Image (spheres, rainbow, N blue to C red):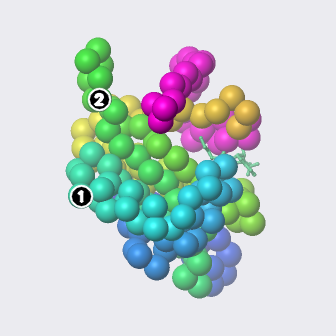
């Protein structure tokens, strides 16, 4: 079992758990720090679908004062050419609470989930501009395996 709590300072503990409805507004604020504007109603709908699937998991990090300071999403990536594997879909820690180990705690929860579903690896794709996050992954045992370009076609017209 991975660590699910972290002692940040005396009487300040961080706990990892599944999200609850009251966490949604904070999750939306944190998504904004990640660079994505979203309403908490949208997050509610997305979480509902993810929570009904065994191939998705979301964890939040909460300080002992019931303050949500981070979240992580992880899912099973499936393709024709590879065995399924776990991939982190997003992770963020409040900018006021970084470098205290909260991100590492969240990674541990994602890794534990990945192992529990039998995944042999845990992957993450990270934008080239997120240099500090890249250090964070390397520090936590990830290795850079390739650099990609992402293409998108709008289907709204
Ligand atoms: C990447 C992130 C989740 C790490 O969370 P964290 O709680 O700061 O992580 P930890 O405290 O466990 O580890 C911190 C280490 O990660 C790295 N790091 C990455 N981003 C950092 C940041 N913005 N501030 C400080 N350290 C950062 C540093 O190497 C740091 O090591 P140090 O404390 O010895 O300097 C967090 O910085 C964040 O939310 N960044 C913005 C969103 C983002 O880039 N997400 C990743 C998307 S792929």
Give the quadrant of residue 20.
bottom left
Report if the beta carbon of the residue with label 2 is closer than 8 angstroms to ligand 1: no
Point 30% across, 56% down: residue: 49
x and y percentages locating residue 23 in the rendered image: 49, 74
Give x and y (percent) for residue 24. Answer: 49, 71
Q: Is residue 65 visible?
A: yes
Q: Residues within 10 Å of mark 1 (few under 14, many from 20)?
A: few
In the picture provided, is 153 more to the left or to the right than 21? right
Relative to 80, is 88 above or below? below
Does dot 1 land on a helix, a strand or a loop?
A: loop
Residues drawn in magenta: 131-157
Q: Mark 2 highlights which residue? A: 78
Q: What's the residue at 56%, 58% (across, down)?
A: 38
Alpha-carbon neighbours of circle 2 within 10 Å: few (<14), some, or many (≥20)? few
Report if the beta carbon of the residue with label 1 is closer than 8 angstroms to ligand 1. Answer: no
- The stretch drawn in magenta includes residue 134: yes
Q: CA distance from mark 2 to mark 1?
A: 18 Å
Helix, strand or loop at label 2? It is loop
According to the picture, the residue beneath numbered tag 1 turns out to be: 52
- Total labels drawn: 2
């Amino acid at each position: 079992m991975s660590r699910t709590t972290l002692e940040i300072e005396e009487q300040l503990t961080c706990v990892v758990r599944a999200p609850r409805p009251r966490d949604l507004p904070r999750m939306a604020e944190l998504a904004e720090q990640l660079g994505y504007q979203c309403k908490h109603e949208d997050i509610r709908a997305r979480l509902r679908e993810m929570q009904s699937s065994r191939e998705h998991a979301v964890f939040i990090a909460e300080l002992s004062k019931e303050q949500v300071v981070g979240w992580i999403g992880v899912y099973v990536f499936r393709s024709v050419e590879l065995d399924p594997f776990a991939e982190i879909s997003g992770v963020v820690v409040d900018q006021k609470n970084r470098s205290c180990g909260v991100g590492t705690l969240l990674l541990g929860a994602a890794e534990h989930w990945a192992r529990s579903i039998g995944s042999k690896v845990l992957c993450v794709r990270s934008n080239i501009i997120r240099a500090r996050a890249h250090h964070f992954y390397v520090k936590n045992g990830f290795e850079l395996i390739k650099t990609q370009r992402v293409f998108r076609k709008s289907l709204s017209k």
